[in-house]
Amino acid sequence: MKSKVILLRYGEIFLKGRNKSYFEKLLIDNIKAKLDGIKCEFLRTQNRYYIEDYDEELTDEIVRRMKEVFGLHSLSVATKVRTDYDSINEAALEYAPDVETTFRVSVNRADKSLDKNSAQIGADVGAYILQRRKGYKVNLHRPALEIKVDIREKGYSYVFSGVEECAQGMPVGCSGKGMLLLSGGFDSPVAGYRMARRGMELCAVHYHSFPYTSEQAKQKVVDLAQVLTRYAGKIKLFVVPFTEIQFAIHEKCRADYMITIMRRIMIDIAERVARSNGCGALITGESLGQVASQTLQSLTVTNDAVQGLPVFRPLIGMDKYEIMQTAEKIGTYKLSELPYQDCCTVFLPKNPVIKPSLDIAKKEQAKIDGLEALVEQAISNIEIIELKPEN
C-alpha cells in the first residue's frame, strides 16, 4: 500500500490554549471550502491534517489552493506507506535523486510500539540510501537534501523531503469583520490582504464618479476584490456613487482642502455602511507620508470624521516598494497598474494641503449645502456586488 498525501501544518493556533478548538474549526472550514470541487478525503489527527485519495494530477492545484489559506503554516507532499521498515526504505529512496549530494534522514516516531527508536530508524534508512546512491554523503548539520520520516500511530508512516511555506496568519473569520476602503491602486488591496491574514473577514466600499471615472475603472476594482476572495473568502463590495458629492466639494470648498474634505466624507460614508453591515472596523491602505493625504496631520483630520469604529492602517509603516512586492505576490499588481482613473484623481488640486488644520477643514466642509442629504442619497443608491472565491 502506497499513496500520495498532502500534509498540512498550522501555526499560531498552537498558542491559543483552551480556545484552540474554536480556531481549528474555522481553519478546517476554510480548508474544506478551498477544496470545493476537488474529490478528495480530508483527515485530521492530533496537530496534523492530511488530504488523501485525490487525483495526483491535481497535486499542484491543491497545493496552490492550500497556500492561500490563512492559518496554515506549511505543507508537504508526502508518500503514505504502512509502517514496516522495507516500505519506509523504498519510499525514502524515491526522494533521493541519483546525483552527487549531501543528505540526512530525520525521523519523528509517534508510534512507540516499534522495536527501534528514531535515531536507529534514521540510521537504517540512511544506510539503505547510501548503498543505492553512490554519490551521496551524510551531512547531519547542513545537508543539501533532508528526507523526513513521520511514523504515526495506527500503522502508517509518511515520507517526504520538501516543506513549502503557506500564507500563515490566522483563519479568516476569527477576528471579526472589517470594511475596506478599496480603490484601484496598489495599496488598498494589500491592506485588505494583510487584515485578512490576521483573521478578519472583509467587506469593501468603493467610490465611483461616473461619468468622470469609467466602467473599466469600476470593473478594475471588482477584479481586485475578486482576487482578494482567494484569501479572504466571500466579499460584499459596496459601490458608492460619488459624483454629486465631488461636484459639491469642488464648487464650495478651498481647492487645497478638496482632498482632505473628500477623505473625511469617504470615511464617514464607509463607517455608516460598515455599521449597517456588521463591521467592527474600517481598513485603509494609507502609508505614513506617502502622499499629501497621508501625513500625520491629514490622518488626524480624517480620523476626526469617524464616530467610533477603529481605523486599521496595516501599511502605515511600509514603503511603496514593500507594498508593490506584496501586490506582486498576491496577484493584484497587474490589475492595479491598469491606467483607469478612480474618483480620487477627479478634480485633483495642483497643490493639496500637506498639514491641514482641523478647524479649517470643518469650516470648509460646512460650506457644502445639504451635505447630509447628498450623503444619504449616495448611500441609498449604492450598488452591491457579492463576490465569491473561484478557487
Image: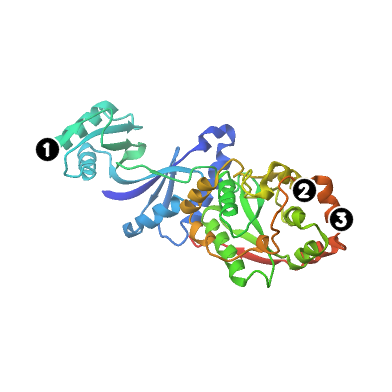
Q: Position of residue 183 (x, y in %)?
A: 62, 58
Mark found first going from the N terminus, 1 or 2 = 1
Asked if residue 345 lies left or right of residue 66, the reply is right
Q: Position of residue 369 (x, y in %)?
A: 87, 62
Seen from the viewer's position, the closer of residues 375 and 225 is: 375
Q: How many marks?
A: 3
Q: Position of residue 254 (x, y in %)?
A: 80, 57
For the question of whether residue 373 can be seen, the reply is: yes
The residue that disc 1 covers is 134
For the question of whether residue 379 can be seen, the reply is: no
Residue at (61% x, 72% y) in the render: 215
Q: Amino acid at mark 2?
A: Val
In the displayed structure, 152 sits above or below 346; it is: above
Task: Give the crowd class for mark 2: few <14, some 14-19, many >=20 residues within 10 Å.
Answer: some
Q: Amino acid at mark 1?
A: Lys
Nearest to the eye among marks 1 and 3: give it.
Answer: 3
The residue that disc 3 covers is 366
Q: Is mark 1 in CB contact (under 8 Å) with mark 3? A: no
Residue at (62% x, 43% y) in the render: 316
- Element class at badge 2: loop
Residue at (65% x, 50% y) in the render: 284
- Element class at badge 3: helix
In the displayed structure, 289 sits above or below 138; it is: below
The residue that disc 2 covers is 306
User: Label 3 vs label 2: CA separation?
Assistant: 16 Å
User: Label 1 vs label 3: CA separation?
Assistant: 82 Å
User: Label 1 vs label 2: CA separation?
Assistant: 69 Å
Asked if residue 151 lies left or right of residue 371, the reply is left
Mark found first going from the N terminus, 3 or 2 = 2
